[in-house]
Image (cartoon, rainbow, N blue to C red):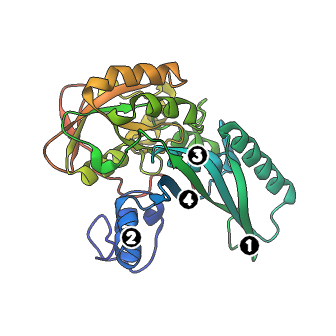
């Protein structure tokens, strides 16, 4: 199957939408990569895997990071490259342990900026209690790399009680988010200063280990799915879970936490906060009987805005709907188009 545009036209070349985390990203993964690399690990989740070695379950993940500008309120490219990989390991139910970091650096890039990135990464690693143990650098000609690209991989050990997967979501489960959505996307967009809109919005970029690991240790068997809504935002992440589980998800618009400044900026710019990147929020799907206990534990462990926003249904399979604030129903598909390139 070849990637298609939102109008159904065949694409022969990569465009920015292929990197936006939405439908074209998923089409590209299946048509170019999964069809050639296909194995049981890749089929479950392309950016992470759980591997069994000598009786232990190890989580392995990899990600590439590019952000323009490289520093925005609440986030830097260096911190993002560590926190993003740590949070990906958490979505496997794993305690993060070790990271690698590789750099593709453009000729002429200031060494002082590279040192700043390295300092931010070192500080972020200490905060997450992980070690950066290996890496690589490559330098390309001037004009070929937009400054610097960072690729990080991570290894962690899956907790004994954890068994999380998008395919585990089941009818009757509750859907929880751990914080306000859309902050990172809006923070990056406003920092670019391209639209003449000013607002005090900080990225939510942060590690979630201190909130999620205690929940997994205490309520692991009740937690079915963990997913971080980065590229493509909350709506795309919920669609991924619905498709992987063969179930339906319905959320309540009035319960989804969105900061007033984020909502106002979205209204001015014509953006939908449900499709904007988050870098410090996790989506959990848990058994309904554990909903209140998990929310209470999350709030106690540093995620005070955690809240149940909806539930999993049997049908229509693979679909996500939202009960709107005026009582109507809106279907939320995967991201189509490019909400914001070079963001994470």
Give the alpha-carbon distance from disc 4 to disc 2, as whole Å: 16 Å
Give the alpha-carbon distance from disc 3 to disc 2, as whole Å: 29 Å
Q: Quadrant of residue 210?
A: top right
Which dot marks residue 63? 4
Which dot marks residue 53? none
User: Outermost residue, right direction?
Assistant: 112
Residue picked out by circle 1? 138
Residue picked out by circle 2? 28
Which residue: 48% across, 42% down?
159
SS class, disc 2:
helix
Q: Nearer the viewer, mark 3 or mark 1?
A: 3
Which residue: 40% across, 23% down?
295
190 relative to 248 in the view: left or right: right
Residue picked out by circle 3? 96
156 relative to 164 in the view: left or right: right
Residue closer to the observer: 201 or 86? 86
Query: Residue 276 appears at what percent x and percent y?
Result: 45, 44
Residue closer to the observer: 72 or 224? 224
SS class, disc 4:
strand
Q: Quadrant of residue 62?
A: bottom right
SS class, disc 1:
strand
């Amino acid at each position: 199957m070849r990637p298609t545009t939102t109008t159904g036209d065949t694409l022969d070349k990569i465009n920015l939408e292929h990197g936006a985390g939405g439908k074209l990203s998923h089409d590209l993964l299946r048509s170019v990569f999964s069809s050639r690399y296909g194995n049981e690990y890749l089929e479950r989740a392309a950016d992470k895997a759980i591997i069994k070695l000598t009786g232990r379950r190890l989580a392995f993940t990899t990600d590439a990071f590019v952000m323009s500008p490289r520093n925005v309120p609440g986030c830097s490219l260096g911190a993002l490259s560590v926190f993003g990989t740590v949070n990906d390991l958490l979505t496997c139910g794993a305690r993060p342990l070790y990271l690698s970091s590789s750099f593709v650096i453009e000729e002429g890039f200031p060494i002082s900026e590279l040192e700043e990135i390295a300092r931010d990464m070192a500080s972020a690693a200490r905060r997450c209690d992980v070690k950066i143990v290996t890496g690589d650098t490559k330098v390309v000609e001037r004009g070929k790399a937009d400054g610097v690209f960072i690729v990080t991989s991570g290894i962690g050990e899956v907790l004994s009680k954890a068994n999380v997967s998008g395919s585990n979501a089941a009818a009757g489960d509750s859907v929880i988010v751990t914080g306000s959505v859309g902050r990172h996307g809006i923070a990056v967009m406003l920092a670019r200063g391209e639209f003449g809109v000013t607002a005090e919005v900080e990225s939510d970029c942060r590690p979630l280990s201190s909130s999620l690991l205690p929940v997994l240790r205490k309520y692991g068997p009740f937690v079915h799915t963990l997913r971080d809504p980065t590229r493509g935002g909350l709506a795309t992440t919920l669609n991924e879970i619905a498709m992987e589980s063969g179930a339906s998800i319905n959320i309540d618009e009035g319960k989804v936490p969105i900061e007033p400044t984020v909502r106002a900026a979205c209204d001015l710019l014509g953006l939908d906060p449900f499709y904007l990147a988050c870098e410090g929020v996790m989506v959990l799907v848990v058994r309904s009987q554990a909903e209140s206990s998990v929310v209470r534990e999350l709030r106690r462990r540093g995620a005070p805005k955690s809240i149940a926003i909806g539930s999993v249904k049997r049908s229509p399979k693979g679909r996500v709907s939202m009960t709107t604030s005026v009582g109507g129903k809106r279907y939320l598909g995967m991201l189509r188009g490019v909400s914001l390139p070079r963001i994470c």
